[in-house]
Image (tube, helix red, strand yellow):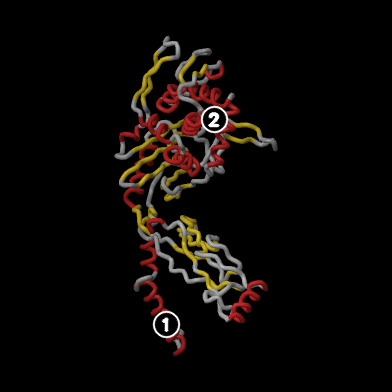
Amino acid sequence: MKCFGTKQKVFFSLFIFVCFLAFFLPGGFPAAAQEEKENSTNLQLYARSAVLMDADSGRILYGKDENEKLPMASTTKIMTCILALEEGNLEDEVTATAYAASQPKVHLGMYQGEKFRLGDLLYSLMLESHNDAAVAIAEHVGGSVEGFADKMNRKAQEIGCEDTFFITPNGLDASVQDASGGQKVHSTTAADLARIMRYCIGESPKSEEFLEITRTQSYSFTDIEGKRSYSCNNHNAFLHMMDGALSGKTGFTNNAGYCYVGALRRDGKTFVVALLACGWPNNRTYKWSDTRQLMAYGLENYEYRNVYEEAQLEPLPVEGGIPGDGKPYGDAFLPIEVAGEEGKELKVLLKEGENVERNILLPEKLEAPVEAGRQIGAVNYCLDGELLREYPVLTAQSMEKIDFAWMLHFIWKQYSL
């Protein structure tokens, strides 16, 4: 049996001591593992793709394959509704075409030539998810389904949805051939779908009208001529599941599976949940389980914190500038200030362990002349590398440059004295 020498014994003792420190002292391996465990969401979701979003900031608080492009079924109709509200008139008269009347179930059952008030069709669209109502609305507002799809895609781009492509106004499975000969599918991502809902409930100039429609429990109307009566009931069960439920839209097709996008506002916090491919028959309740779980996670783990820190900014040196005493011999310094810090408050929705980083970005010096109110830097607040807020740093006053004419004037004043 081989024995250890003195050097080996010392090395082995040091090794044991290091292992002891790593495993049993604060910051050791078990402590780090425990911290990682405590910071994990531990969410078990049915949805293939899911997002929990802070609707006030647009920040994604939780994502599961949130950027995977998938069909979204009738959740499409939130975009159809908000566009109709923004670009149409609720008192407009909409005439059903043969194409609109031919749409499959679920449908209102309109027939070709029948006339409706646009505002009534929006309840048909959002409460009962009628496919014929969606096409009739699209043809009226966009001139055609294709024209309306163009509007949908432009709006998606405007609100930051880079991975969304609309073909139909009702969300039925569809694909088209692009310019290169490939196939583009009617699809979005959970992240983009949450962005669209965020726009609908808060950023759109018609958000209040959108909320009024989508929160209505039942609605009855007739065609323009009053020959037929229709009744619609809201199928968004989430409205009765949690206090503060704001809005939502369900969807299902064979390709998309069950989908859902919904919003909730409680305790000053507003969340959006988006789910894609959340089960297939007979699992229609999976979407409600996932939605409740994500909303509860947001409510229980996130609180608003004021992360504002007053920036103490020193005056910046100005090369070639006129010093404050009016003499060309000394150094010139210009006072600077942070703009837009009204109320000195910046509230951010954060969970335990999250910290906002403040960065002050300024040049080392300025060059004369400098005008007052010029932006020369910024104070940024970032979380995990994502910019939350930027405050511009401005010059508090102007400063002229020492030039030949100024020097002549200075010498003349000294001679006069």
Element assignment for label 2? loop
The answer to which of 63 and 85 lies nearer the viewer is 85
On-image quarter of the C terminus: bottom right
Q: From where the camera sits, is residue 273 visible? A: yes
Q: In this view, does 8 lie above or below 291?
A: below
Q: What residue type is labelled 1?
A: Leu
Identify the residue at the far top of this view. Answer: 227
The answer to which of 286 and 344 lies nearer the viewer is 344
Q: Mark 1 points at which residue?
A: 14
Q: Residue at x 63, y 78 (%)?
A: 412
Q: Residue at x 48, y 22 (%)?
A: 133
- The picture quadrant where one finds residue 284 is top left
Identify the residue at the far bottom of this view. Answer: 6
Q: Residues within 10 Å of mark 1 (few under 14, many from 20)?
A: few
Give how far across and how far down residue 25 sits, in percent.
35, 73
The answer to which of 206 and 387 lies nearer the viewer is 206
Give how far across and how far down residue 278 sits, in percent.
44, 38
Q: Name the residue under label 2.
A: 173
Q: Which amino acid does label 2 sit on?
A: Asp
Q: From where the camera sits, is residue 171 visible? A: no
First reached walking from the N terminus: tag 2 or tag 1: 1
Cα–Cα span, label 2 and label 1: 66 Å
On-image quarter of the N terminus: bottom left
Element assignment for label 1? helix
Give how far across and how far down residue 250 sits, in percent.
42, 32
